[in-house]
Image: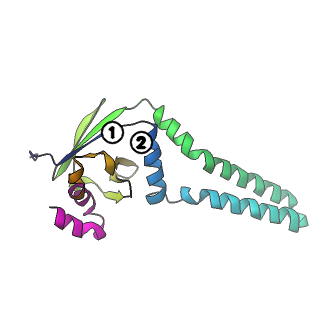
Amino acid sequence: MTLCKKMIARSKLAFNEEYYAQYYSDWMRTRSSFRKFAVPLGFLIVVVGFVLLTQFEGHRYLGIVVIGFGIFLLVDALTYRSRWIKERLGAGGSKVGQFEFHDDRIHIQSDSSEGHFLLSGFVESTPSDHGIFLIPQKGISFYIPWESIDPPESLPRIRALLTKKHNKSWESDAEEAV
């Protein structure tokens, strides 16, 4: 494999509580299919349970079960973020990482591994207000906050490189930045 010589930018990350909180927040807004609807759905299930309990005499026990399920869903949804972050912090994985951006690839280095990903190898990229999710395969994603890109003036070019393959609305930025 031929590698580009010139690095465009670098991102140094500490995989700490702040990083995972931002990751989760952006994931909820851009990538989550169900989780963002869990609280309203839980509330709706509790309301349906109360209706069954109070309005339908023959279904009171079902109403109690439905209320219990709705409360379980609400508690799970409202505590999921903190449990998810705690699980990531306690996983024992890398504590720091560095991403070096080139025209055709990303060099990734952490305290436990090192490798290259060709930009053409990512199956999806999802930009958000605060960062981007790079998905090399289903179930795996890298989250890179925009504010971690150094030098900051390279951000338009990095955005263009990472999003133009999968997001048509950013292609004009790609043409301008390159």
How far separated are the C-alphas under marks 1 and 2? 8 Å
Q: Is residue 176 inside the magenta stretch? A: yes
Which of the pair 146/38 is nearer the observer? 146
Q: Is residue 142 inside the magenta stretch? A: no
Q: In this view, does 64 lie to the left or right of 95?
A: right
Q: Position of residue 97 (x, y in %)?
A: 31, 36
Q: Which mark is residue 29?
A: none
Q: Which comes before the other along the chain, label 1 or label 2?
A: 1
Q: Where is residue 75 in the image (x, y as percent from the top left)?
A: 67, 48
| Disc 2 secondary structure class | helix
Q: Position of residue 127 (x, y in %)?
A: 35, 58
Quadrant location of residue 67?
bottom right
Q: Range of the magenta residues?
A: 157-178
Q: Position of residue 169 (x, y in %)?
A: 30, 70
Q: Note whether 147 is above or below 43 in the view shown.
A: above
* Mark 1 surroundings: few (<14), some (14-19) or many (≥20) residues within 10 A: some
Name the amino acid type tagged 2.
Tyr
Q: Note whether 151 is above or below 64 in the view shown.
A: above
Name the amino acid type tagged 1.
Leu
Q: Are marks 1 and 2 in contact (CB under 8 Å)?
A: yes
Is residue 125 shown to the viewer in this render?
Answer: yes
Q: Residue at x 25, y 63 (%)?
A: 164
* Mark 2 surroundings: few (<14), some (14-19) or many (≥20) residues within 10 A: some
Q: Residue 13 carries which label?
A: 1
Q: In this view, does 70 lie to the left or right of 177?
A: right
Q: Which mark is residue 19?
A: 2
Quarter of the image with the N terminus in it: top left
Which of the pair 128/153 is nearer the observer? 153
Q: Is residue 135 left or right of residue 32?
A: left
Is residue 101 shown to the viewer in this render?
Answer: no
